[in-house]
Image (spheres, helix red, strand yellow):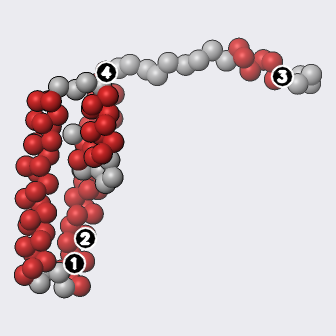
Amino acid sequence: MLARFIPASRTSAITVAAMLHLPFWKFLLATATCVLITTPMQIGFGYLIGLGLTSRDTFGAIQWLIGLSLLAAVLVVVFWAWRRSRRSGATLPRAKARWLRQFRSGAR
């Protein structure tokens, strides 16, 4: 599903789906869901451009709005992941450091 939103990745996603024998209805469901999101956005942006609302000031405001929205989304995801890892109480596994002994110098 995410390949629909990443530029130049749709063709490879279709190829991978075919190679993995993804059922057609699953692929169609994912693609149709994404189309329901992207098509209104593209038509809406086209409509705004047609109205001439893309003056330099409006364009800058839209860029700031999009940037702040993306920043907020990233912060929410990072906070969610941090909170989830804290709740689980699991610690990261540590590798044994015995292999470092082979690099000891003769001085002690």
Is 54 placed above or below 103 here? below
Q: Residues within 10 Å of mark 1 (few under 14, many from 20)?
A: few
Which numbered disc, 4 or 1, marks the residue that appears first in the sequence? 1
Q: Find the distance from the CA under tag 4 to the CA under tag 2.
A: 38 Å
* Residue 87: % across, % down: 29, 24
Q: Are marks 1 and 2 in contact (CB under 8 Å)?
A: yes
Residue on which the image places disc 2: 63
Q: Find the distance from the CA under tag 2 to the CA under tag 3.
A: 55 Å
Residue on which the image places disc 4: 88
Q: In the image, is 86 to the left or to the right of 30?
A: right
Q: Residues within 10 Å of mark 3 (few under 14, many from 20)?
A: few
Q: In the image, is 3 to the left or to the right of 33?
A: right
Residue 61, visible in the rendered structure: yes
Is 11 placed above or below 80 here? below
Mark 4 or 2: the one toward you: 2
Residue at disc 1, secondary structure: helix
Q: Find the distance from the CA under tag 4 to the CA under tag 1.
A: 44 Å
Q: Find the distance from the CA under tag 1 to the CA under tag 2.
A: 6 Å
Which numbered disc, 4 or 3, marks the residue that appears first in the sequence? 4
Residue type highlighted by circle 3: Arg
* Residue 1: % across, % down: 21, 39
Q: Are marks 4 and 1 in contact (CB under 8 Å)?
A: no
The answer to which quarter of the image holds residue 29 is top left
Which quarter of the image is occupied by the C terminus?
top right
The residue at 88%/24% (across/down) is 105
Which numbered disc, 4 or 2, marks the residue that appears first in the sequence? 2
Q: Residues within 10 Å of mark 4 (few under 14, many from 20)?
A: few
Residue on which the image places disc 1: 59
Residue at disc 2, secondary structure: helix
Q: Which mark is residue 21?
A: none
